[in-house]
Image: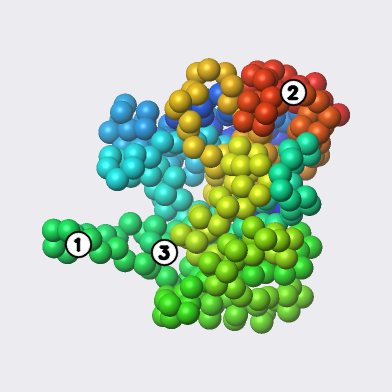
Amino acid sequence: MLARGRRKDYQPDMGHAVTLIEGDGIGPEVTGAAVRVVEAAGVGVDWERAEAGAAAAARHGTALPDATIESVRRTGVALKGPTTTPVASGHASANVALRKALDLYANLRPVRSQAGVKTRYDGVDLVVVRENTEDLYSGIEHVVVPGVVETLKIITERASSRIAEFAFRHAEREGRRRITAVHKANIMKLSDGLFLECCRRTARAHPAVAYDEIIVDACCLQLVRDPSRFDVLLLENLYGDIVSDLCAGLVGGLGVVPGANLGDRCAVFEAVHGSAPDIAGKGIANPTACLRSATLMLRHLGEDRAAGRIDRAIDRVLGASDVRTQDLGGKATTLQFTDAIVAALD
């Protein structure tokens, strides 16, 4: 599924070296559940532990220590828990820094309806592809005069072209029928205009996949009216961040959807929800998003059979039992839910 970024020295009959970044808050709990389930599925993994986030900042003076970056460069693959980023002050985002340091330019968010998770919509099955390295997330901002702050939106032909190419190649591999580029080129004619120019050029090189465009606000409106009209959404960084969370809300929230950050040499798979410090240590966190991210990681490593076993086990537990965590209307603890997943492995 996720061939881009796979380690060239990977051999199916060997164990896998994977960097494990537990993160903050509930991070150690949900990544711990994922480690247990991956191992129960019979996959040999040498977990190399590394730090990132607020706890790392307190210990090392940086939210992303050099040792963590070097670990992911060495293993080529990481499973990451949520990290805390202070609002309007404090250290910079470890997530953004990690993506920049490793050039993880493609953010992939599959969004599918979950068995047994009742929402307003049935049969949602779409993919959000988000450019991951530039746009307003470049972090180039300064105070012009007191009371006036300027932030620069950076859109380049290189980044726009490669994320478009990634999206079309992913659609071709997965049998997806259409890509919709999401933009605001009616207002930002140069920056978003360049993005669209790159998407259109790439679309012409991939005629087997249909291509269309939609303004970002209209996209949000149509998503909540009828998400089935979309297949693959292709977006710049900021729009992708917002729209991917909206899409998660269509299927039950951030607690049930996975995420992957992919580059040409490295890949980081992560739960996309927050660190939830209010429930940290209480043993009630929902590990589903981290488990689904782990199955994306396993497919990236060529462990398709084990990934399928875990996905089916999650579907069985959510669809045919009352073992679910509080955020999904149940009373199960993280441990009880994880036990049920392990028991449901076929």
Indicate the position of residue 66 as horizontal and vertical percent values. Answer: 37, 39
- Residue 255 in view: yes
| Amino acid found under the numbered disc labelled 3 | Asp
Q: Which mark is residue 207?
A: none
Residue under label 1, please give it.
148
Color theme of the render:
rainbow
Q: Which mark is residue 323?
A: 2
- Residue 170 in view: no
The answer to whether residue 232 is above or below residue 96 is below
| Amino acid found under the numbered disc labelled 1 | Val
Secondary-structure class at tag 3 = loop
Which residue is most to the left? Answer: 146
Indicate the position of residue 257 as horizontal and vertical percent values. Answer: 64, 43
Q: Residues within 10 Å of mark 1 (few under 14, many from 20)?
A: few
Query: Which one is in front in this view, the residue at disc 2 or the one at disc 3?
Result: 2
Indicate the position of residue 116 as horizontal and vertical percent values. Answer: 78, 36
Residue occupying the point 81% across, 25% down = 321
In which quadrant is the C terminus drawn?
top right
The answer to whether residue 176 is above or below residue 10 is below
Q: Residues within 10 Å of mark 2 (few under 14, many from 20)?
A: many
Query: Which one is in front in this view, the residue at disc 1 or the one at disc 3?
Result: 1
- The answer for how far apart the CA atoms under marks 1 and 3 are is 20 Å
Residue occupying the point 58% across, 52% down = 246
Indicate the position of residue 208 as horizontal and vertical percent values. Answer: 77, 75
Residue under label 3, please give it.
135
Question: Could you say which is closer to the camera, residue 277 or residue 78?
Answer: 277
Relative side of 140 to 281, left or right: left
| Amino acid found under the numbered disc labelled 2 | Val
Which residue is most to the right? Answer: 346
The answer to whether residue 203 is above or below residue 266 is below
